[in-house]
Amino acid sequence: MGSVATLLLLRHGRTTANAAGGLAGRQPVELDDTGRDQARAVGERLRGLPLAAVVTSPLIRCRQTLELALPDAVPAVEEGLIECGYGEWEGKPLKTLAKDPLWPVVQQHPSAAVFPQGESMAGMAARAVAAVRSWDARLTADHGPEAVWVACSHGDVIKAIVADALGVHLDLFQRIVADPASVTAIRYTPTRPFLLRLNDTGGDLSGLVPPARKRRRRPTRAADSDAAVGGGAGAGR
């Protein structure tokens, strides 16, 4: 399953709103001390990887995470990766929102959830998936199948992208977890995406880098989309 780029989805570090139990939405909340430590720690894991691009949500918590994690990078801002537009929910405590009639819809039937004065969860998922798939195709074309790239975004956005990669309905995306400063790795192929890592908060990431090809770059083949029957030998093999 080798001849396509590898996407590393990075959630921003913990924010002051996360620590206080609030829903930040698109407010300009910043990382707290724990979040800054998380960003530096994930930077140690990312450092040394041959990154073809670093892409970010426009919100400051994502940009701060990348400034600490990858200080030499010049991230490209991608509006499609911005946090869900929670509208009137934005800035409120989660314990208060849990009493709202919309809460069980968000929990059990998110594809039907539309936030007052905000965005639908289905709309958020569609524009986020479109953004990463477009970037991935472009980077594969420009940098070849060994390309690895980072996209820094938000919890619900990452969960929606993972649900798409797994081929599951958005109504199941609340089963997925994306912790602050976690790494989730996806490799798209012509036939199917492969979820390589999910909510990874520790350990070596170098195994996600495809081995360099000794011969001339070849086009993607149908076999590159095939899953390893029996599980295979692992990433990078």
Image (cartoon, rainbow, N blue to C red):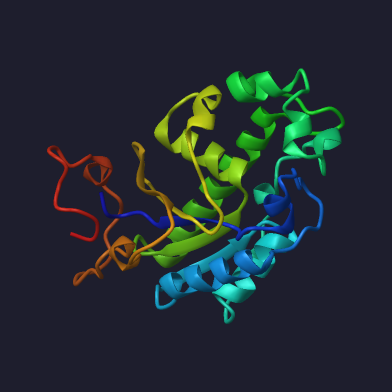
Residue 64 placed where, x, y %?
Answer: 68, 69
Q: Quadrant of residue 227?
A: top left
Q: Can residue 75 be seen at all in this image of the molecule?
A: no
Rendered view: 23 above or below 16: above
Q: Is residue 155 above or below residue 168?
A: below
Describe residue 34's horizontal placement relative to residue 226 as left or right: right
Q: How many marks?
A: 0
Res 214 → quadrant: bottom left
Image quadrant in which the C terminus is located? bottom left
Q: Position of residue 195 (x, y in %)?
A: 37, 44
Considering depth in this image, is 201 or 119 the residue closer to the camera?
201
- Work out whether residue 130 or residue 100 is closer to the camera in this orientation and state it: 100
The reply, left or right, for residue 210 in relation to residue 128 is left
Give the residue drawn at x 49%, y 71%.
41
The residue lying at 40 percent from left, 56 percent from top is 6
Q: Residue at x 25, y 49 (%)?
A: 1
Using the rendered image of the protein, determine whether residue 180 is visible from the camera's viewpoint: yes
- Measured from the top left, where is residue 70 in percent x and y? 55, 75
Residue 47 screen position, x and y as percent: 44, 76
Residue closest to the eye, 75 or 118: 118
* Quarter-of-image position of residue 208: bottom left
Image position of 145 with respect to 118: above or below? below
Q: Nearer the viewer, residue 220 or 192?
A: 192
